[in-house]
């Protein structure tokens, strides 16, 4: 299993479930949840966290800016 | 999962919401390009350190409430009159960074005269133009920028050019005027395009600081509610149909 290099945190209450992040993710990390948030939207979450490379494309494209992106620093050998 | 939990720590942070963008939840529909462009403007203001000296001019249209989202000073203009108000603000306070934010119904329809004359006078302002080819707020009516054959609530069979005329290419029009220094057309449907659009907005603000004249940034956008598509479908439709009529890229850069 690939070792995750990145991770995202979604503000699930602010997310409107537009799915733009899902389509922009190059490694298919993000899914829309089966559950809904307080406003009735299927919010985004990390469905496949191991594949995240921390490219920040989802954060950059999110119209509601509800994704925070982290990327692990390369470990020195 | 343990990997993910160790990665989420402040030293690994690479992208978060800028503080210039307020925490209010935007009223825009899911996937609306307005939110992305608001974010880019806020990020540019943050990076240039001009939060205290920037005045935005809000339009009439979906983005009428833009002042609720970006933490700067704002003025609300009458419909289409944002360039005229921006002119006044900039002339009275030349040390401020002034930008107008308008949609196509505002900038290219009711406000065409103000737009053209502000650009012709070379007012030292930044104009952000959101072009989604439709009147979004009022229910998806045909706009001057609606594509030939594109359905809208007032032309359900599609725009008939023989009856309604061809869509206005406002950026091409304004690029001919000597007052404009920078006219560019961008989009925010992919992460790469968002990054390019941000560079363009930054350049426009830098042009203003260098007293170069009017900078216009057109952002070809989607209106997924008005177009009756999902946000992802709307982005695809825009790529397939809008870009051939409204090609992306710089039209003028002096």
Image: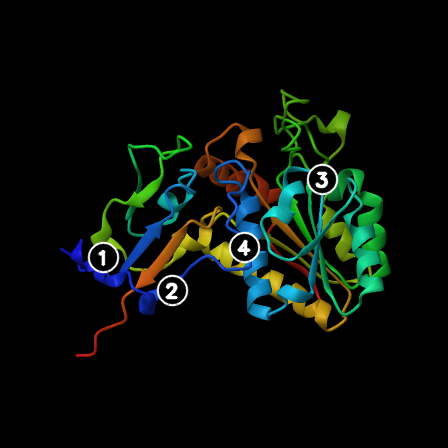
Circle 1: element type:
helix
Same chain for mark 4 and mark 1? The answer is: yes
Left or right of B237? Residue B151 is: right
In the rendered view, would you say A16 is above or below B117? above
**Residue A74 vertical position relative to residue B25 in the rendered view, above or below:** below
- Badge 3, how many Cα within 10 Å: few under 14, some, many 20+? many
Q: Which residue is mark 1?
A: B4
Report the disc number at residue B60. 3
SS at circle 3: loop
Badge 3 vs badge 1, beta-carbon distance below 8 Å = no
The answer to whether tags 1 and 2 share a subunit is yes
Residue at the location (69% across, 41% down)? B104
Residue B210 versus residue A70 in the image, above or below: below
Query: Mark 4 highlights which residue?
Result: B21
Q: Nearer the viewer, mark 4 or mark 1?
A: 4
Q: Quadrant of residue B103?
A: top right
| Chain identity of mark 3 | B
Q: Nearer the viewer, mark 4 or mark 3?
A: 4
Alpha carbons under labels 2 and 3: distance apart: 35 Å
Front residue of B152 and B173:
B152
| Of callouts 4 and 1, the N-terminal one | 1
Q: Are marks 1 and 2 in contact (CB under 8 Å)?
A: no
**Crowd class of label 4 (few under 14; some 14 to 19; many from 20; radius 10 Å):** many
**Could one spot residue B97 in this view of the protein?**
yes
Residue at the farthest top position:
B157
* Residue contact at pointers 2 and 3, CB within 8 angstroms: no
Mark 3 vs mark 1, CA separation in Å = 44 Å
The CA span between labels 1 and 2 is 14 Å
Please name the residue that numbered disc 2 is placed on.
B14
Badge 3 and badge 1 in a common chain: yes
Determine the image quadrant of residue B7.
bottom left
* Marks 4,1: beta carbons within 8 A: no
């Amino acid at each position: 299993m690939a070792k995750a290099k990145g991770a995202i945190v979604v503000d699930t209450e602010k997310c409107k479930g537009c799915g733009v992040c899902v389509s922009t993710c190059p490694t298919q990390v993000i899914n829309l949840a089966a559950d809904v948030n307080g406003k009735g939207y299927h919010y985004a979450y990390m469905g496949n966290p191991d594949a995240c490379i921390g490219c920040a494309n989802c954060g950059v494209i999110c119209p509601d800016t509800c994704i925070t992106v982290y990327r692990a620093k390369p470990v020195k050998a | 999962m343990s990997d993910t939990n160790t990665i989420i720590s402040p030293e690994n942070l690479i992208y978060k919401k800028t503080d210039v963008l307020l925490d209010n939840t935007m009223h825009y529909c899911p996937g609306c390009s307005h939110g992305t462009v608001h974010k880019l403007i806020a990020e540019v203001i943050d990076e240039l350190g001009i939060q205290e000296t920037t005045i935005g001019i809000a339009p009439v249209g979906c983005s009428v409430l833009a002042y609720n989202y970006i933490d700067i000073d704002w003025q609300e203009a009458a419909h289409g009159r944002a360039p005229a108000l921006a002119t006044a603000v900039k002339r009275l306070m030349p040390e401020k960074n002034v930008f107008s934010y308008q949609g196509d119904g505002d900038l290219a329809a009711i406000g065409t005269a103000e737009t053209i004359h502000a650009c012709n006078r070379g007012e030292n302002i930044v104009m952000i133009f959101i072009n989604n080819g439709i009147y979004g707020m009022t229910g998806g009516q045909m706009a001057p920028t609606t594509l030939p054959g594109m359905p809208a609530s007032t032309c359900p069979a599609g725009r008939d050019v023989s009856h309604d005329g061809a869509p206005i290419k406002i950026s091409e029009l304004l690029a001919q005027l000597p007052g404009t220094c920078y006219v560019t057309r961008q989009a925010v449907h992919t992460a790469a395009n968002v990054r390019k659009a941000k560079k363009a907005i930054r350049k426009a603000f830098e042009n203003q600081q260098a007293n170069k004249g009017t900078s216009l940034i057109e952002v070809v956008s989607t209106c997924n509610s008005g177009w009756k598509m999902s946000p992802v479908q709307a982005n695809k439709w825009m790529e397939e149909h809008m870009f051939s009529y409204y090609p992306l890229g710089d039209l003028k850069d002096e």
